Amino acid sequence: MTDEVQVTSQSINKDHKTVVPAFDNHDYVTVAGLDKNSASAGNRARFINQAIRTLRENNKAKRSKDRCVYLMFKGTDKNIGDKAHEKLEEIVKNRHKADYRVLDSAQELVSFVNTREDEKHVIKKMDIFTHGYPGSFDFGYEMEKDDVYRVNSGHVTQWKAKMFDGKAVITSFSCRTGLNPSLKKVKDFEAEKKEPKYDESLAQLIANTTKSTVYAYPTRSDYENTYGEQTIGAKTGRRWDEFWEKRVKKVKAHDVEMEKYRDKYSQYIKQMSDYEFNLKLHKKEDLPPAPTPPKEPKLDMSKEDEAWARERIKEKEIENECDLSIKLDGALLPVVAGTTPKGLPRMLMKFEPKK
């Protein structure tokens, strides 16, 4: 769970039995779904980039003998092609030192969970980024494999508790995982005088099945500010700290500076071509004066900022090549609670095993 969001606790059943895992090697698992809508908030790579951001957080928390695992659904060329998988695998493995694995069905996620024992690892932490309804994770929402990629209560109840560490934490950043499925049409719980029935949610079922602590939103989740593009300091209810404010501003400043640099560098390449042509002509004809070589433009940045800005250029190249805006270090800002349905806590809620 990230430290940028508030948490409220459900009542805890202290009589539940903790399952003691057979191994002390931990997996920090991140699961990312697909998005078909490039115009939606956070664009088609929003789940991917939030998952990469979590890899960074997990690498800080894990021990040397633990590992991070990135699970990505295969999809089709319409939502993520082979080239995008190739680039994403390269980023995950080489930059973030994590395992990259591709799933092609909800049942394959069940198989991954239940084979941790074969790999002598148990799940310490699992973060889920995808579309969701009350009662399901939709890893291929409104796509060709919508039904095949949908993880529901039937799949969750197959997860074996012994595959999770005794203090495992599972966090869903999907919409309404903490809400009872029968209430998905309720728009305002206070106005309609409806009870959320948190105890009958998918989040509670996951907690009961895995004997783990689960965090989930009863509301929809909001990926709109994944890249920090909203106005800094806007009255959105979000908690902006000084670090993120500076970083968002720096991203924009780098983009402007790099655009200027690229223009100057393009001019420099042309000038160099002219210079080399004139130099050859000068040597052949032995005509004075000798041509003067152009000066290569310099970036008005520190070496650290220049390296970071060049990474932004690489991200643009990946986007042009894959038609998917994959970020090398993932999202800038975390997922937050959405505003609907009304009358529910706008925060991650805590679910503990009850049986």
Image (cartoon, helix red, strand yellow):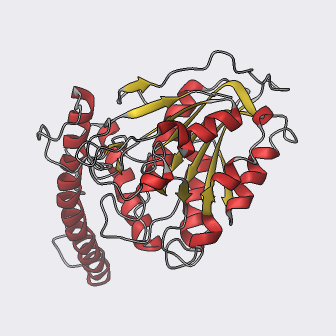
| Above or below for 42 versus 269 | above
Q: Position of residue 24 (x, y in %)?
A: 79, 23
Q: Position of residue 222 (x, y in %)?
A: 32, 49
Asked whether, in this view, residue 39 is left or right of residue 318, the answer is left
Q: Position of residue 197 (x, y in %)?
A: 46, 40
Residue shown at the point (61%, 71%) measured from the top left: 147
Asked whether, in this view, residue 156 is left or right of residue 53, the answer is right
Q: Quadrant of residue 16?
A: top right
| Above or below for 52 versus 302 | below
In which quadrant is the C terminus drawn? top right
Whether residue 27 appears in this view of the structure is no
| Above or below for 55 versus 321 | above
Whether residue 338 appears in this view of the structure is yes
Asked whether, in this view, residue 157 is left or right of residue 97, the answer is right
Residue shown at the point (68%, 65%) measured from the top left: 105
Farthest residue to the front: give it. Answer: 193
Asked whether, in this view, residue 168 is left or right of residue 340, the answer is right
Farthest residue to the right: give it. Answer: 118
Please count the marks in the image. Answer: 0
Residue shown at the point (25%, 57%) measured from the top left: 296
Q: Position of residue 178 (x, y in %)?
A: 47, 42
Farthest residue to the top: give it. Answer: 14
Residue shown at the point (54%, 42%) measured from the top left: 200
